[in-house]
Amino acid sequence: MLKIIKSGLQTTVQDLGRFGFQKYGVIVSGAMDPFAHRTANLLVGNEENAATLEIAMVGPAIQFEEDTFIALCGGDLSPEIDGTAIKMWRTVAVKEGSVLKFGAPRTGCRVYLAAAGGIDVPDVMNSKSTYLRAGIGGFHGRALKAGDLIPTHPVSPGHAASLLHATDNELEWKIAAPRYFNEPIVRMMKGRQYELFNNDSKEKIFSEAFSISSHSDRMGYRLEGIKLSLEEPKELISEAVSFGSIQVPADGNPIVLLADRQTTGGYPKIGQVASVDLPLISQLKPGDRIRFKEISVEEAQKRYIEQEYQIRQLKIGIYLKREEWK
Amino acid sequence: MNFSFSPLGDQAIVIEVGQEINEKVQERVRAIAALLEADPLPWMVEIIPAFTTVTVFYHPLATLYETVQQELEERVQHISEAVAGEFRTVEIPVCYGGDFGPDLDFVAQHNGLSPEEVIEIHTSGTYTVYMIGFAPGFPFIGGMSEKIAAPRRDSPRLRIPERTVGIAGMQTGVYPIETPGGWQLIGRTPIRLFRPEQEIPSLLRAGDKIIFRQISESEYHSLKEEQHAEDH
């Protein structure tokens, strides 16, 4: 059980998303940085899809109601337990009654807290992700607030013993943690409507830097910089969008659609961020900058497969170690 | 039949079946969706049918773009033999005007009609649901009379209560959940369109025929109570 003492800016329960219901207009939701979410789970012996807490920008204060194990992966929001700084991207043992707090964001802006056993909230349409606007999923369909008691699944003695070993041994799991920059170069495929844009826009999307506007949230990031426009005005017919679609409304400022994107959209899509680079975007804060570099669909899929292979190796490595220690 | 294929990033493919919104194209979209749902390819994650496209999501770990396109091309060749499925007719009771439909008078004035005439025209048509999108269970409904068409509001409202019926251009629709939006609001239905607790969480589906029926405020409240009782 986790007790929320202070709410933070926006802390929500997330898993890898709600799939299969987009045809009914139900958005996917899920972790903004799936790599960090999955790694955090693996480090505490959970399934990759187990529910974690997604903590954004200003972290909450959380008290642990029993001895447990946690992992924090993603942006570095200066986490500390009872006043002592703790390491990110590894397994950490916590004592009953201790309090986790966060300070200033150092890199990135979203951190995933996985607790051994996983956050125990009911499935809604096969997912534990919070869908704020519809008020469903997660913890009562809303962001966490002071006083909330968030249940976690119990952990078996064998599971706990192996995690204790992992923390005692100062073990390095050799995780190639992504380096979050505040001016990343992000790989982008040309979008379905790329050719409809004028030459200036087609060129500048790859040569100019854009900054993240303060009107940015889990649904999408608005980018500011040069304005993009079509060769000639055209009414488009709404069609599916996805995680990383870059659409351009009439005002010319691109929007990168993220975890809480709507299912369909009618604005022209100039590009699509490669799946492997989505964590780089999800960790940007208002004022950070971004540049795009072209990548083909083939190459993007190759990079995706490589990343998946790394996660699998990590998963197998952790599994084998834990079996040894049980 | 001509289909074109193009990638939507590295995890989805768009099948375009037409260039404009009409019933014929909508039927083809529905036929492809039905075919793929009835007999999914092993790498399919989910599909989103829209006005003129069906988008298929997949994991690149299971298969790559080229194969996805080839297998879909083969599959949709047989689409003429597929059936779009039977359509259903769904009646949506609506309490028009007043607090429920603050823009009914605007829609009337804009078209040189009385509010009663707007209601009469709105309830006399048979509509088709073209797609579900934007919000959970939100139907894009085509087939509305031009006589009651009205432009979107210049500045969208920040909160539109759930189950509010609106008009935008020649489209009409119902907001299933509270959201911001720019449509002209003409009434409210006691019927829930988004049902997260049910296996199919959307009351309406693409292809459904819709009829609007006018109800009084007291009927609105009793229908809403009835539904509330059913839900619990």
Image (spheres, coloured by chain):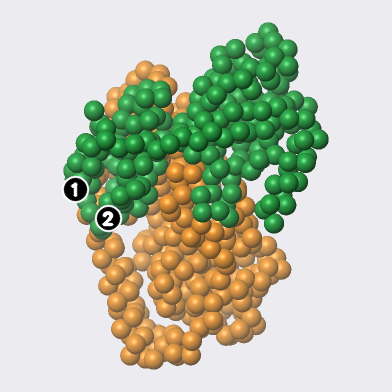
Badges 2 and 1, same chain: yes
Q: Which residue lies furthest to the top in this view?
A: B112
Quadrant of the drawing holding the N terminus of chain A: bottom right
- Above or below: residue A210 compared with residue B130: below
Residue A112 horizontal side relative to residue B172, left or right = left
Check disc 2 and give the amino acid type: Pro
Chain on which label 2 sits: B
- Above or below: residue A109 compared with residue B126: below
Q: Residue at x 60, y 73 (%)?
A: A151
Q: How crowded is mark 2: few (under 14 residues within 10 Å), some or many (20 or more)?
A: few
Residue contact between numbered discs 2 and 1, judged by CB atoms under 8 Å: no
Q: What element carries label 2?
A: loop
Check disc 1 and give the amino acid type: Thr
Q: Mark 2 points at which residue?
A: B42
Nearer-the-camera pick, B74 or A159: B74
Q: How crowded is mark 1: few (under 14 residues within 10 Å), some or many (20 or more)?
A: few
Q: Mark 1 points at which residue?
A: B67
Q: Residue furthest right?
A: B218
Please state the horizontal and vertical placement of residue A233, each as a whole percent of the image: 40, 19
Query: The chain coloured green carries which letter?
Result: B
Query: The chain coloured orange carries which letter?
Result: A
Chain on which label 1 sits: B
Please state the horizontal and vertical placement of residue A7, each as a whole percent of the image: 66, 63
Nearer-the-camera pick, A34 or B54: B54
First-in-chain label (2 vs 1)? 2
Q: Is mark 1 on a helix, strand or loop?
A: helix
Please state the horizontal and vertical placement of residue A316, each as a whole percent of the image: 29, 77
Res B125 → quadrant: top right
Nearer-the-camera pick, A70 or A149: A149
Res. A286 in view: no
